[in-house]
Amino acid sequence: MKLATKIIHAGAEPDPSTGAIMTPIFQTSTYVQEAPGKNKGYEYARSQNPTRKALEDALAIIENGKYALAFGSGVAATDSVMKLLNPGDEVIAANDMYGGSYRLFTKVWERYGIKFIMVNTGDVAAVDAAITAQTKLIWVETPTNPLMNITDIAAMAAIAKKVNALLCVDNTFASPYLQNPLDLGADIVMHSATKYLSGHSDVIQGALIMNDTDLREKLYFIQKSCGAVPGPMDCFLVLRGIKTLHVRMKQHCENGEKIARWLRQHPKVAKVYWPGFEDSAGYAVAKKQMRGFGGMISFELKDDSEKEVTRVLSSTHLFSLAESLGGVESLINHPASMTHASIPREERIKNGLSDGLIRLSVGIEDADDLIDDLNKAIG
Ligand SMILES: *Cc1c(COP(=O)(O)O)cnc(C)c1O
């Protein structure tokens, strides 16, 4: 079955009791049992909920996985992966990644004796060199937030296998429409469903997708024991968002390409970060593992003074100044003071995230209107 058909029909069985074509929002905490221990597969809603199950089935199908688990947020999903580890274990993580993942790793999990080694995962040899017998997990984001660096997922999977470590890929930026890490050898795919999967900036949610039954059992145990589960209304919203993922992503890609190429020739723009440029470092790998380049773009102005950057960030009308991404409406963001403020400045600068960097989440409005908006703001 082709992706567009899978996206519409994944996990969508009519409700058996009524025939309702849309999965009902099972707003319940518990389920009545016929006799002690005799139930319909549902006992308590932290462990199982039919709306959540429909969503998890859909997520597994569209990521080409066997199993999926939904969580109350993207970071809750990430946190659950960390709970697979033990004190003394080492994690190799990308040196350019979502600020909240960096904060969770360094400010929370390091206190519990997990060691994080931050490496440029775009450099396969550097990751290979950082591997030790204690490496239990490689954590990769591709394209990265916010510098759009590309990591070769298949190469990471090969390195992880050598030491029996898990490879988890944060696939939030690409979405399952553009990239399926499990097909490339990853063990776990993580999503902030808050972004492209839901697509309408109206819900916070996370997900993990995997193939291995034992790994699924371990993560399900963590999901129900630690309890970071999403509510049924939120599951319904993500399930509904997924139904238009392919048409939205097509437009995000088309608009993203137009804007990236337009920005690049703008006389006041110094540098544009977008994985679709043929001369960018990650292009060959991106072309190999992605089906398109998405709607996320970062750029730097030639005049990168705080005053000028602030002026541009405050001058757009269609691009709203806000954190987050992946919604139908366009957003503009200043990583250094917003999404990535939790990363120490020296660490940010070392990894190429400048104070002047501007990040765009290109929505699905008319691209000409979006270019007009940016043109007036940049001046
Ligand atoms: C937003 C985001 C997260 C965290 O997800 P939440 O749903 O906000 O908890 C993780 N990774 C990436 C790449 C993100 O953009």
Image: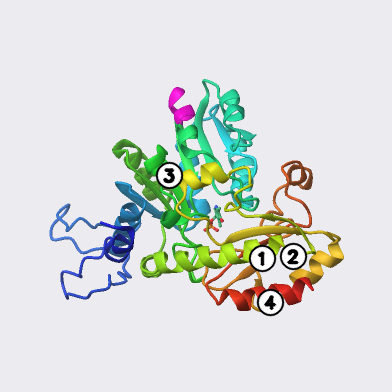
Q: Secondary structure at mark 4?
A: helix
Q: Secondary structure at mark 2?
A: loop
Residue 356 visible in this rendered orientation of the protein:
yes
Q: CA distance from mark 3 to mark 1?
A: 30 Å
Amino acid carrying mark 4 in the image: Asp
Question: Which comes sooner in the sequence, label 3 or label 4?
Answer: 3
- Relative to 115, does residue 268 appear above or below in the rendering? below
Q: CA distance from mark 4 to mark 2?
A: 14 Å
Q: Secondary structure at mark 3?
A: helix
Q: Which image quarter holds the N terminus?
A: bottom left
Q: Is residue 176 left or right of residue 51?
A: right
Dot 1 and dot 2 residues touching (CB under 8 Å): yes
Q: CA distance from mark 1 to mark 2?
A: 7 Å
Q: Is mark 3 within 8 Å of ligand 1?
A: no
Residue 241 spot, x, y in % from top left: 41, 68
Q: Is residue 336 left or right of residue 206?
A: right
Residue marked by disc 1:
262
> Which mark is in front, 3 or 2?
2
Dot 3 and dot 4 residues touching (CB under 8 Å): no
Residue marked by disc 4:
373
Q: Is residue 144 left or right of residue 14?
A: right
Q: Is residue 185 left or right of residue 323?
A: left
Q: Is mark 4 within 8 Å of ligand 1?
A: no
Residue marked by disc 2:
266
> Which mark is in front, 1 or 4?
1
> Looking at this rendering, what residue extends furthest in the top direction?
133
Amino acid carrying mark 3 in the image: Pro
Residue drawn at x 57%, y 64% is 256
Callout 3: few (<14), some (14-19), or many (20+) C-alpha neighbours within 10 Å?
A: many
Question: Which comes sooner in the sequence, label 3 or label 2?
Answer: 3
Residue 187 visible in this rendered orientation of the protein:
no
Callout 2: few (<14), some (14-19), or many (20+) C-alpha neighbours within 10 Å?
A: some
